[in-house]
Image (cartoon, rainbow, N blue to C red):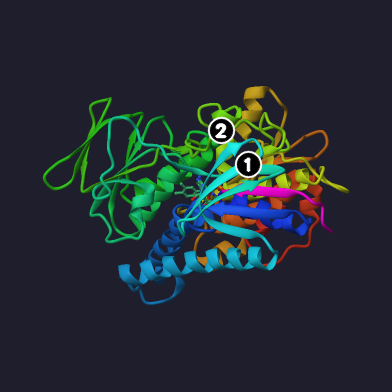
Amino acid sequence: MNVDKKLVIIGGGPAGHSAASAAARRGISVTLIEREILGGAAHLLDCVPSKAMIATGGAMSFTDNLSGMGLENRTAEVDVEALTARIESIKSRLSNDVHALLQSQGVTVILGTARLASAHTVHVDAADGTTHVLEADDILISTGSRPRIPNFVIPDGDRILTTRDCYPPRSFPDSVTIIGSGVTGVEFAHMFASFGSKVTLVVSRQQVLPSKDPEVAAVLEDSFLSRGVRLFKGARATSVERTENGVRVVCDDGRVSETTHVVLAIGSLPNTEGLGLEEVGVVTDGGYIPINRHCQSNIEHIYAAGDVSGKLPLSSVAAMQGRKVAEQVVGGPKGPHRHLDYDKAASAIFTEPEIADVGLAEAEAFASGRKIRVTKVPFSTTAKALINNDSRGFVKIISDPATGEVLGGSIVGRHAAELISVIALAVTANLKVTDIEESLLVHPALAEALADAAE
Ligand SMILES: Cc1cc2nc3c(=O)[nH]c(=O)nc-3n(C[C@H](O)[C@H](O)[C@H](O)COP(=O)(O)OP(=O)(O)OC[C@H]3O[C@@H](n4cnc5c(N)ncnc54)[C@H](O)[C@@H]3O)c2cc1C
């Protein structure tokens, strides 16, 4: 199939490369421009390296607690060089796989920096010193985001760090203050605690993960406290200064944290400067590009996907948006399809214990006055939790009391990020609790708690 259309994509992260692959499959002629590495910040700087470090930290905690499994306790030592090599090899493997796939599909990849020269042309300064002016029927902006830096501090890459300065891990800090207790902040707190750093977490609200179910956040807070993580709740950092041996963080309530390092984890900003958006007439809002449900900007043939769209900053969402763009470029979906529903995106937090949720949250339902049925089953009721020597956590399913439709759920505990897929599928496909309850699941498995919660 050749649809005789040219799509130019700026940015090769999950949004850009997924769109490129899906568009090439539909016979569109695709050129993708990437200024750093295919796979994007997701592979190079954020998602993949942080999860690789968390996996090693998790393995260390596991070996620290072997006696409960009938094994002699051993303490693991981290080999920073080996860990760095492992992260590099995962990154290059993933990036090479993306490159090979796009090449096999006939996508033209140019390494370089791109910007809009007009509504139908893209200017590229290629890494090899050449320049290109590409004509396009459609253009996708998928340039991602970068860490937000508060105005009272300048990161130095040495002791005052953004999340991206934390890898490759040259060494692990003796002590670290993490400013910000959203998903990234708590993951970094968990990661550094696993490697033995003394962690202080500055939590601006009264709970970590302010947008999450309070019951879920409470489990994580208890876990942090039991591991010696200090929580500065209800405190906002107002200054960060280098001292002789480290960094001093002062908060608005007078509390002070003195540690060897500080990590800033207070959100992100879109990479939209210098792209020529304003000149071409693409509307932005706080730097983000507002989009409709087909990922179109105010100019129909200029699309935005991924973090720049200001929707959910998740790799999974970015990739799905990219695929939707490809669909739209050929005139919209053919056959049965679903519009992207951001309220039904599953997400996970890779802490100890792991946390995952999807769909309607209990607090949200109460706030809107919607009647719901909530069932909660602890993992301790399953044989697998006892076998694993880890009974922490629970499954919570939220359903409509009248129809039995599954509206959402949250899971805290081992493999939560994998197990949430069952509830995510139910939410997306409008399944009922009986569909989960009547599934013949494996025994012994943590998933049995899902079936029990659906009863
Ligand atoms: C610490 C951390 C951990 C995370 N963990 C997870 C996780 O576990 N799960 C999850 O789903 N999400 C996670 N995320 C979020 C996830 O990384 C982002 O949502 C995802 O990377 C967004 O993909 P994207 O395609 O929009 O952008 P990116 O992955 O940022 O890719 C954009 C690409 O565009 C390129 N680019 C920018 N400007 C130009 C230009 N002018 N010309 C050419 N190329 C350009 C960049 O070099 C980059 O490669 C995490 C984020 C952080 C900060």
Look at the image and tell me in which quarter the N terminus lies.
bottom right
Q: Which amino acid does label 2 sit on?
A: Leu
At horizontal 30% and vertical 46% (from top left) the residue drawn is: 161
Dot 2 falls on a residue whose secondary structure is helix
Task: Point out the stretch of residues depicted in magenta.
Answer: 1-10
- Residue behind label 1 places its C-beta within 8 angstroms of ligand 1: no
Q: How far across and down, in percent of the image, does residue 320 sit? A: 68, 48
Give the residue pinned by disc 2.
277
Does the rendering let one see residue 35?
A: yes
At horizontal 48% and vertical 64% (from top left) the residue drawn is: 91
**Residue 18 position (above or below residue 242):** below
Choose between 193 and 260: the one closer to the eye: 260
Give the residue pinned by disc 1.
121
Q: Which amino acid does label 1 sit on?
A: Thr
Q: How far across and down, in percent of the image, does residue 163 sit? A: 38, 48
Taking 243 as reference, is 92 left or right? right
Residues under labels 2 and 1: Cα distance? 12 Å
Residue furthest toward the right? 335
